[in-house]
């Protein structure tokens, strides 16, 4: 057996982070797209924290993110409405070059009234494949060919949103994909073909539900949880659990956005990660049953356990039969209440208005400012919490390649809520 050793370090709630001595002093340039979002902003933060490796970071988004570091160059770039030729001109004007690229751009088209958050699969594919296609074409025309192109997709690759899937979820080959409409598939195929044509390499990262603090990204379960707990406290109520004991008990892996930032750098710089898809979760077993008392304690209120009277649940049977695992009965969702329906109560809206006034929160971020915003915030939390089947993504593949990073998920959630409070999105704990 050949022994190998590496140096690791801790940073705040992040433990056993890798180091990159072979890359120190290289002064790389990087493009980070979607730099205004939860993932993109944390990738920028991870690169900024390593000046010994990263000299210039081009942070691209439709709305250029604010730059607080002279190594970060913010660029307004719209990959959807701009042609590749338009982007070429922009890249030339801004002097863009890149040794590495991190692509996290994502657009969530509004679903039809009364439909689920990700029900509009055709629109999702059209928009998000176009984002990547235009960007890749512009890179080719500009002769900007990175050493590695890191594309972020997600856990929905495994069809976990359609019912029980094979557990643990492993990074299978394209031939073993669960057949369903998902824009991640054409994105991955497009990137791998482009990389082969341009004699370079790609890596795909697949996080679970991402927890992070970002005022421009409302599709964020930690934001909805903080608002829910704050309003229940304001109303003198306890935390109620929306689903059954199965949803209370099962493991649901989450991904802390800041850990995802560190992982993305590792994925880009690790030779064995070339041309591979990799899961990235906190690797911290997590259940809402264990977390519910913790969340209640943070807000100084009580909590309820799941309703035991089965007759009080509204039962939804998922339409996919058999479920994504390939056999057995379709997934069943037992609903005591939905957060989206809860948010539409007048007393809830009024309570949030009082909280905003008392805490001097940023009213332009108010989820009640539009119906679409309300669905994005609370419909996301429903999608996360209501299903009674496990969501476990194994980190075995990345660990074998040398990844060692770890966050305890409840610590990630607490830090996220504290950061959102600093941004005046939610009250302080």
Image: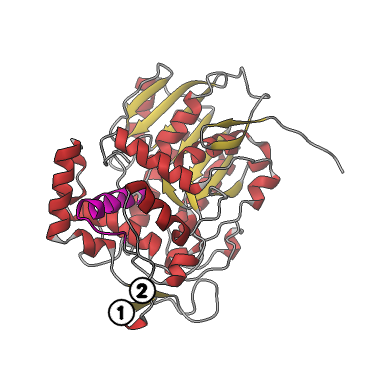
Residue 28: x percent and y percent?
55, 22
Q: Observer-nearest residue: 39 or 126? A: 39
- On-image quarter of the N terminus: top right
Residue hosting label 1: 312
Q: Quadrant of residue 423?
A: top left
Rendered residue at 25%/55% (across/down): 232
The colour scheme applied to this rendered structure is: secondary structure
Residue 219: x percent and y percent?
32, 50
Cα–Cα span, label 2 and label 1: 8 Å
Magenta region, residue range: 221-239
| Disc 2 to disc 1: CB gap under 8 Å | yes
Residue 426: x percent and y percent?
27, 42
Q: Secondary structure at mark 2?
A: loop
Disc nearer the start of the sequence (2/1): 2
**102 displayed left or right of 231:** right
Residue hosting label 2: 307
Rendered residue at 30%/37% (across/down): 421
The answer to whether residue 402 is above or below residue 349 is: above
């Amino acid at each position: 057996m050949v022994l190998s050793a590496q140096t690791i370090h801790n940073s705040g709630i992040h433990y056993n982070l890798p180091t990159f001595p072979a890359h120190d002093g290289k002064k790389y340039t990087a493009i980070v797209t979607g730099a205004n979002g939860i993932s993109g902003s944390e990738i920028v933060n991870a690169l900024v924290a390593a000046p010994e490796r990263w000299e210039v970071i081009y942070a691209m988004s439709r709305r250029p993110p604010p730059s607080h570091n002279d190594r970060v160059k913010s660029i307004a770039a719209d990959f959807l409405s701009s042609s590749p030729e338009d982007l070429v001109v922009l890249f030339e004007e801004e002097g863009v070059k890149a040794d590495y690229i991190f692509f996290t751009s994502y657009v969530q088209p509004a679903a039809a009234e009364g439909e689920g958050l990700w029900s509009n699969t055709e629109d999702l594919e059209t928009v998000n494949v176009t984002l990547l296609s235009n960007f890749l074409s512009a890179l080719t025309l500009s002769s900007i060919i990175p050493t590695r192109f890191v594309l972020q997709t997600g856990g929905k690759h495994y069809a976990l949103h359609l019912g029980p899937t094979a557990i643990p979820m492993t990074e299978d080959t394209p031939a073993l994909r669960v057949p369903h409409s998902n824009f991640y598939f054409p994105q991955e195929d497009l990137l791998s073909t482009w990389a082969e044509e341009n004699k370079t390499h790609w890596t795909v990262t697949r996080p679970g539900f991402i927890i992070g603090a970002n005022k421009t990204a409302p599709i964020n379960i930690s934001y909805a949880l903080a608002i829910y707990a704050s309003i229940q406290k304001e109303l003198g109520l306890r935390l109620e659990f929306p689903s059954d004991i199965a949803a209370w008990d099962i493991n649901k892996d989450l991904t802390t956005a800041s850990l995802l930032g560190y992982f993305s750098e590792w994925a880009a710089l690790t030779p064995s990660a070339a041309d591979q898809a990799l899961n990235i979760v906190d690797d911290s077993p997590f259940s809402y049953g264990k977390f519910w008392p913790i969340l209640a304690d943070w807000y100084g209120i009580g909590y309820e356990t799941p309703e035991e009277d089965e007759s009080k649940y509204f039962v939804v049977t998922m339409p996919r039969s058999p479920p994504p695992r390939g056999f057995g009965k379709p997934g069943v969702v037992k609903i005591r209440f939905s957060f989206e329906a809860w948010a539409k109560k007048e007393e809830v809206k009024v309570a949030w208005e009082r909280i905003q006034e008392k805490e001097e929160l940023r009213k332009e971020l108010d989820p009640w400012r539009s119906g679409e915003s309300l669905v994005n915030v609370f419909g996301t939390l429903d999608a996360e919490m209501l299903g009674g089947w496990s969501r476990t993504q194994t980190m075995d593949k990345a660990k074998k390649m040398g990844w060692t990073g770890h966050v305890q998920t409840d610590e990630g959630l607490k830090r996220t809520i504290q950061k959102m409070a600093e941004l005046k999105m939610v009250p302080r704990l």
